[in-house]
Image: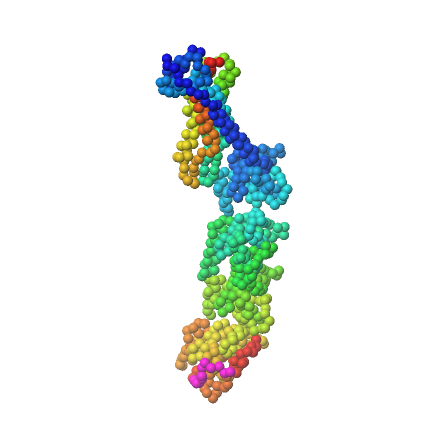
Amino acid sequence: MEPPVIKAKKGLSPIWILPLVALFIGAYLIYKDFQEAGIMITVQIKDANGLITGKTKVMYKGLPVGTLKDFEVSPDLQTIEAHIEMLKQAKEELTTDCKFWVVRPEVSMNRITGLETLMSGSYFEVQPGTSIELSTSFTALDEAPPVSMNTPGLHLTLQSKDDVSLQPGSPVYFKKIEVGEITSNLLLDNGTIETKLLIYPKYMTHLSSDSRFFINSGIRFHANLPKVTMQIDPLKTILRGGVSFFTPDGSQKTADITTVFPLYASLSHARRVDYIKIKLRFSVDHGLEPDAEIRFNGITIGSITDMELDDTMRTVHAEAYIKKSMKRLLRKDTYFWAVSAKFNAGGISGLDTLITGAYLNIIPGNAEQPGRDFLVHASRPVNMNVNTGLNLVLETDRLGSLGYDKPVYFRQVKVGQTTGYELSPTGQNVFIYVNIHKPYVNLIRENTKFWNSSGFRIKGGLLTEMKISTESLAAIVGGGISFSTPDKDDMGNPVPNGHHFSLNRDPDDKWLTWSPALKLGKIPPKLIHAQKTSPEK
Amino acid sequence: MDAGFISCHDCGILVNVGNIAAETILSCPRCNANLHFRKTHSISRTWALIITSAILFLPANLLPIMRVDFLGTQEYSTIMDGIIYFFHGQEYGIGLIIFIASILVPLFKIIGMLIILLSIHFKWKHWLRHKSAMFRFIEFVGRWSMLDIFVIALMSTLVDFGTLTSTQAAPAATYFTAVVVCTMFAALTFDPRLLWDA
């Protein structure tokens, strides 16, 4: 047996540091837990679908600020009381008007929200209030509250009488860029729909007090043959509806929060606001439809909007809007008439209306006073005061196949046309109004003879010489008027506007031989003056 | 001890130390290891380690042990959450294994060691054979209780797809490791012969 080596004794075991460290850690954890211990609040909810105790969070701007701890059905079995532990830091924000709601995934035809909850599960969302009174008991909202008025941006109110398919969250567009959103949509007691919206701060400058808001209906199909337009808004708008606005040029770039804007049903409605509104009256069988155009010399200057029958059921009252720039056309005596397709032996007219539908044509009047209320005639004016050329009145005992727009021939060259006809005041004659085109005015002299060149004439007997005389084929079918002016010495002076001639049924053989030398393309100064006074009606 | 013999812990040589004062420190003549009649401060060290592990056992189980990020959503789960998850999924076997390895075994070790220490402290003379059998079991089972940590270590390396989904260890993993390490050391520092000294 060897003797052991003897060494000095060591101090106390340092192992006791371990439990001390553990104690310290434990104490720290307890302290931390106590420090972070949240505030217990109760939120009344309708149902607890998708909510998990201990897991479901209360989110504020995407950050968790609380956790669902426990459920309890309320004593009356109507609601569920959710006990939620909120972060200690949130204490000051738990005021009486603090709003809670449950965010769940929602996929419907017109909106898709809360998709993130498909992955993370439903959660509570909280929106702090402005009150200073603290509370620990809340009732959850059914759905997310409208964007609070504190959100930076421009809060506006739109009013509309029409039904609108808008929902909170629907976008607001400016030049197809999303610049805001609808925050709420309320039906007021008086039937007005009040839509509140928020314009993001970045885009506030695009808005002025003259801005006009209109509804984006999603898909617009406008088939006004031959032009078919189809406009499709972004998919989001189709699903959820949306509002657009435009700001007319030159308007002041300021809009007040208190401003209430009207909400128009469509872009064209919104555009129409600065159009001139006129009233039209016409008889029932007009062939016009709403949206029928109003044209002047073939250019569209406005359109009819609403139509309704009056109390007698015989007259239609319509509203129409005329472009502001066409204001000058609207005189008190401006003449409106409906144009629709006509087929008859005398001709085919208004073919374009077969495709585009009937439209209104106007002839501006000369009166100084502007007019806003007009009667729509069934046909063009009888005594159309064409401002160029020479207007004449032909008297005849019967109209024959003459009518509107029949040609007036000189040596089978068309030099004018009829502009209308009516019975003479005594009923003995027919007045046919004729306009001779400007270059040919000089052909008309006091002794000029007019005859009806419609159809063809057979002259002579069976046993004698038979003579068939015709004008051009068009004149045979459609009818027309020819005239001839005597040779130099017999022709007489030029005639003033509105001069009356008699219209013969047949030409005298002698007339056809006349061949005067007349200067064309020159109008006697006297006639220009005479045109200013309108011929008798 | 009374006979004046010490067995070296390392090489097992039996040394006759005669009647040397208990405070002196002896070295093994063969391998130079320290010689003790019993493991030095065995009782106090074991106490310290067991108390440490008992304290740390609480945060290890109450705090989340694992964090799973799934599509940006963080989800923390404690050990018990995992067990409940498996039981809900009808995976009783896996649930049971995790329950035994992660909760039952550490708890058993801590309580077992406490019983042994208390029986030494109060010089209880009953069930000594059972107690030493229990100690042998505690020593044997110690290495298996790291199961949870292995799982988390594996998950965080295997399940890592960036933002899509990833797994990370949460605070309790540290405490849990500490508990296991402490109980293992406690089993190591404890000298079962002390049971019989009383």
Return the residue nearer the eye: A196 or A203: A203
Q: Is residue A520 magenta?
A: yes
Regarding residue A269, the answer to whether it shows in the image is no
Q: Pinpoint residue A57: horizontal percent, then vertical percent.
A: 53, 38
Which residue is at 40% across, 13% downward?
B16
In which quadrant of the rendered view does residue A258 lie?
bottom right
Which residue is at 44% across, 76% downward?
A414
Residue A130, above or below A479: above
Q: Quadrant of the N terminus of chain A?
A: top left
Q: Pinpoint residue A520: horizontal percent, then vertical percent.
A: 45, 82
Return the residue nearer the eye: B113 or A474: B113
Which residue is at 61% across, 52% downward?
A191
Q: Is residue A89 magenta?
A: no
Return the residue nearer the eye: A422 or A185: A185
Q: Which residues are magenta?
A: A514-525
Q: Pinpoint residue A227: horizontal percent, then vertical percent.
A: 45, 60
